Structure formats: structure tokens, C-alpha cells
Amino acid sequence: MKDYRLYFFPISWIFFIIIAFYLFILNWIISFIFLGILLINIKVTIKTYLHYLWWQYETWIDTTVVNIQKVKVPTTLEGKYLNGVVIRSKDSNPNEKHIGILFHHGFTGMKERNYVWSIPLAMNGFTVLAIDARGHGESIDKEFKKIDILGILSDVKNEIDYLEKLEDVDPNRLIMMGHSMGCIATLTSGYQDKRLKKIVGISGFYDILESFKKHHRILYRLIKKIGPKKLGMPIEEWNKLVSSRYYFEKGHPISDKERVYLVHSKQDGLVAFEDSAKIKEVLNLPDENVLFLEKPKRKYLMSAHRLIGQSTIVSNFLVKIAKSIE
């Protein structure tokens, strides 16, 4: 009689090896499936978060409700132009003279970023000139640099000249509005220009270097270290040319109470709310000249600075300002 126990061990080993092999393959397949699901989830999470931080909400805005004309505005550099648009209401009468508004975007931004405000202004009958500053949006050129803030400020006069000469714009009723870096341009070069009857600074600085020193220590040290080389001048000298406090000290023939307006979120984590509060104090602006918002919260990096979710409130404030000179 055969002893089948002699065959049991080799057969069982072969059986377990086969089972182990298929389990290994199955485990491998399942692992890849779960790895794929994990990677997709990570991608969606990161994309959603970054999408919120740098929300391209301007791509969601229906621009067919207004007429948008592409234009080129000369800079202070000979033969170089800024790309921009003139936005008008669909029923705007070209034979009538309208209030002209120059709208400036922020650093690393573009004219479309402000469509949430510039389009409602146009729909209320104002003619809006929105430009891409040097090195931004459609104004990227080998001779333009994003960090050339002084060059960007020097172009403001040319932009006002262009706005003033538009056939449907009343040269005696001009306004400038700007967000962040655009606010710097508004409260410096714009503040100096006597043709502007109203100026509106949105999320802007009072003293840039002082603000960085107090709220962004690492960035402050970096600017102090590499700033002079990149800017070609001592950082303190540059700061006096781009910070609004030094322009306010020079004064202006038109009363600030009738001319300067501010918008800022108290939760702004990039440009401290203290800056606008200081501007209000220094210029002795009445409460009706400012719109200081409690939201959005500082939970997301740029939401408060860009006033995400507050477009209706801000637009209503800007329209009210523009109508006050009609």
C-alpha cells in the first residue's frame, strides 16, 4: 500500500506557492488601484485648495453684457505699449460724455482680475480703462519687469492721458481705482495728478517697508538684503518713491475728504489692515469715505486680500463713489 503522505508535502507546497503567487498579483493590482485613488484624491485636494487661493474667478464672468475694446496705451519707454481694454455699457451713447475710470490691478495680476468691479462700473454707465501693467498679463515684454514698480508708477500719467482723450469721456470727471500694487499707483502717482477728481485705494499700503518690517519679517530681511542690487538704489530711497505716506506729506490742492476713498478687509494677511486705518487717520477721512470689511476670514492666504466673495458690496461702494461726481 502506497504512503500518500510522501506526496502531501510537495503538493501542498506547490498549492500554497500558486495561491501565494495569485494573492501577490491580486494584492499588487489592489495596491495600484488604491494608490491611484490616493493620488487622484491628493491631486483634487491640492487643485481645490490652490484654486481657492488663486481663484480665477474672472474666467467665470460673462463679458458679453458689456462692450470690451482692446487698446494699446503708450508707456514712458519709447515705442513700448501696455495692453488694455476699454469697457463700456452695451447701451452706452458714444455721443455723450461719461465719467472715465482708470482701474489698476495688483502685483502678478492682470486687468481681468478686476472684472468683478470694472464690469459693474461699466454697466452703470461709466467708461472704464483697465490696463495690464508692465510685465503683467498681456503686457509682458523683454524690457518690462514685474518688479519695476517705479516704471509702473511712471506710466500712470500716460494712462490718464489716454483715458482723458477718449471721445466718450468727460476730461473733467476722471477717477482712478487700484487694488494692492494698483493701490500703490493710485495713492502715489494718482494722488499727485490734479485731473483725478476721485481716487480709490483697495487693499493698499501706507508705508511698504515699515509694514513688511512689522508683519513680514522674513520678506523684510530678504528685501533689505537683495533689494538694493535688484532695484539699483538704497531700499529706503525706493520706499519713499512708492509709499503713499510720503506723497500725503506733500499735500494736494483738492481736499482729501472729498477725493480719497479706501477699501480694505480687516482680515487681510498680506497687506495689514493697519495700513488703511493709518491712511484714514492721517488724511482725516470721514467714515463714509471708507469700506472696512470684517470678511473674508484669513483662513485662506489671499482670500481676504483679494476680497473674495465681497464683490457685490465693493462694487456698490465704487459705483456710489463714481456717481457722486455726476
Image: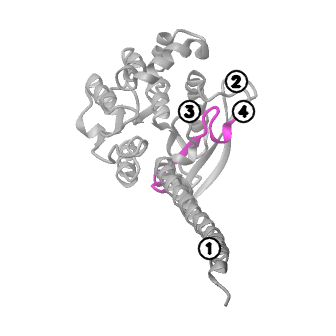
- The answer to the question of whether label 1 and label 2 lie on touching residues, with beta carbons closer than 8 A, is no
Within 10 Å of disc 2 (Cα), the crowding (few <14, some 14-19, many 20+) is few
Disc assigned to residue 160: 3
The nearer-to-camera label among 2 and 4 is 4
Instruction: Work out which residue is located at the far left of the displayed protein and give it.
Output: 287
Percent position of residue 210, x then y:
37, 18
Disc 1 marks which amino acid? Answer: Phe
Question: Which residue corresponds to mark 2?
Answer: 77
Q: Disc 2 versus disc 3: distance between alpha carbons?
A: 16 Å
Q: What span is in magenta?
A: 120-140
What's the coloring here?
Answer: one colour
- Nearest the eye: 56 or 326: 56
**Is label 4 in a helix, a strand or a loop?**
loop
Question: Which residue corresponds to mark 1?
Answer: 16
Specify the quadrant that holds the C terminus. Answer: top left
Q: Is 287 situated left or right of 136 in this image?
A: left
User: How many numbered circles does the render carry?
Assistant: 4
Disc 4 marks which amino acid? Answer: Asp
The residue lying at 41 percent from left, 46 percent from top is 303
Q: Disc 1 versus disc 2: distance between alpha carbons?
A: 80 Å
Question: Which residue corresponds to mark 4?
Answer: 141
**Is label 2 in a helix, a strand or a loop?**
loop
The nearer-to-camera label among 3 and 1 is 1
Disc 2 marks which amino acid? Answer: Leu
Within 10 Å of disc 1 (Cα), the crowding (few <14, some 14-19, many 20+) is few
Tell me if residue 93 comes above or below residue 317 in the rendering.
below
Q: Is 231 situated left or right of 183 in this image?
A: right
